[in-house]
Amino acid sequence: MTKELNSSNFQSEVLDSDMPVLIDFWAPWCAPCRMITPVVEKLAEELQGKIVVGKVNVDQERNLAMQYNIMSIPNLLIIKNGKVVENIVGFRPKNDLQRLLEKHIS
């Protein structure tokens, strides 16, 4: 299950997380974002208990998007121990994303 992330819960859900966090920066009007949503949701389901998966709507959370230099969407970040360890721009197949995530699961 994916979590809606925003300025008020970002610290507790992402930066203070004991697990790696996959964040999907997206917007409702973005067609590639809609394409990657089922992939992200499937990963959240399959890797439950190993990673946290969240979504940030860039139209509603412009400050978070600016803080992480999100210029294009979809943009996926993997954050571990409060630091960005992967930055993925654009659509990627599930296998590619899963391989990247598994590198950071300890």
Image: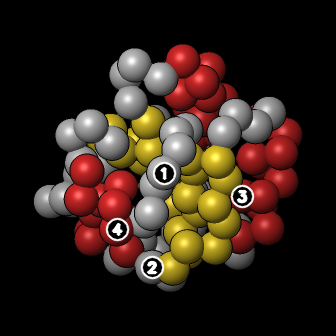
Q: Distance between the residues labelled 3 and 2?
A: 15 Å
Which residue extends farthest left? 8
Q: Name the residue under label 3.
A: 101
Residue 58: x, y in percent?
33, 42
Instruction: First in sequence, mark 3 or 4: give its number.
Output: 4
Q: Mark 2 points at which residue?
A: 82
Residue at figure coordinates x 27%, y 71% from the top left = 11
Residue at figure coordinates x 83%, y 45% from the top left = 96
Q: Mark 4 points at which residue?
A: 67
Residue 69: x, y in percent?
45, 63
Instruction: First in sequence, mark 2 or 4: give its number.
Output: 4
Instruction: First in sequence, mark 3 or 1: give its number.
Output: 1
Q: Nearer the viewer, mark 3 or mark 1?
A: 1
| Discs 2, 4 touching: Cβ within 8 Å | no
Residue at figure coordinates x 54%, y 18% from the top left = 31
SS of the residue under disc 1: loop
Instruction: First in sequence, mark 1 or 2: give its number.
Output: 1
Instruction: First in sequence, mark 3 or 2: give its number.
Output: 2
Q: What residue type is labelled 4?
A: Gln
The relative height of residue 95 versus residue 76 in the rendered view (above or below) is above
Looking at the picture, tell me which residue is in the foreground, 91 or 55.
91
Looking at the picture, tell me which residue is in the foreground, 75 or 13.
75
Instruction: Name the image quarter holding residue 8.
Output: bottom left
| Discs 4, 1 touching: Cβ within 8 Å | no
Q: What residue type is labelled 2?
A: Gly
Residue 9: x, y in percent?
21, 59
Q: How crowded is mark 1: few (under 14 residues within 10 Å), some or many (20 or more)?
A: few
Q: Name the residue under label 1.
A: 71
**Quarter containing the C terminus:** bottom right
Q: How far apart are marks 3 and 4 (CA)?
A: 22 Å
Q: What residue type is labelled 3?
A: Leu
